Amino acid sequence: MKKNMGTVDKVIRILVAVIVVVLFFTHVISGVLAIILLALSAIFVITSLLSFCPLYLPFGLSTRKKE
């Protein structure tokens, strides 16, 4: 796996995940929507920790700075 995520991309994904979790625990979101958003948040956190987004591959995208 070649890393293809930059720092800003990772920070935004983690912030979105944290916001969704807070909204869930404060009962602002619930039901099926909450489950879908929590699953998406988990994917955001995992891809951020790995610095790899599989959806970027088919499009040849990379938000990582060139070395």
Image (cartoon, rainbow, N blue to C red):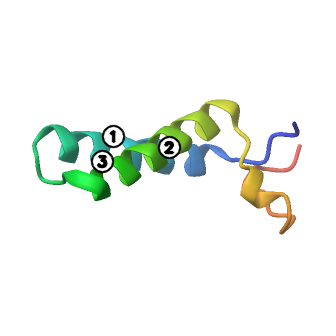
Q: CA distance from mark 1 to mark 3?
A: 5 Å
Estimate how packed mark 1 is, as few (under 14), some (14 to 19) or many (20 or more) residues with alpha carbons within 10 Å.
Answer: some
Image quadrant assignment for residue 41: top left
C-alpha distance separating marks 1 and 2: 11 Å
Return the mark for residue 61.
none
Q: Quadrant of residue 33?
A: bottom left
- Name the kind of residue labelled 3 in the image: Val
Residue lying at 10% horizontally and 46% vertically, measured from the top left: 27
Q: Which is more toward the observer, 16 or 33? A: 33
Quarter of the figure that contains the C terminus: top right
Q: In the rendering, at what x and y percent does residue 50 appear?
A: 69, 32
Tell me whether the residue at label 1 lies in contact with that at label 2, contact meaning CB atoms closer than 8 angstroms: no
Q: Which amino acid type is marked by label 2?
A: Val
Q: From where the camera sits, is residue 5 visible?
A: yes
Residues tagged 3 and 2 counted as in contact (Cβ below 8 A): no
Q: Which residue is mark 1?
A: 18
Q: Are marks 1 and 3 in contact (CB under 8 Å)?
A: yes
User: Which residue position is annotated with label 3?
Assistant: 20
Q: Provide the secondary structure element on which disc 3 rests.
A: helix
User: In whole angstroms, how far apart are the C-alphas of marks 3 and 2?
Assistant: 14 Å
Nearer-the-camera pick, 46 or 33: 33
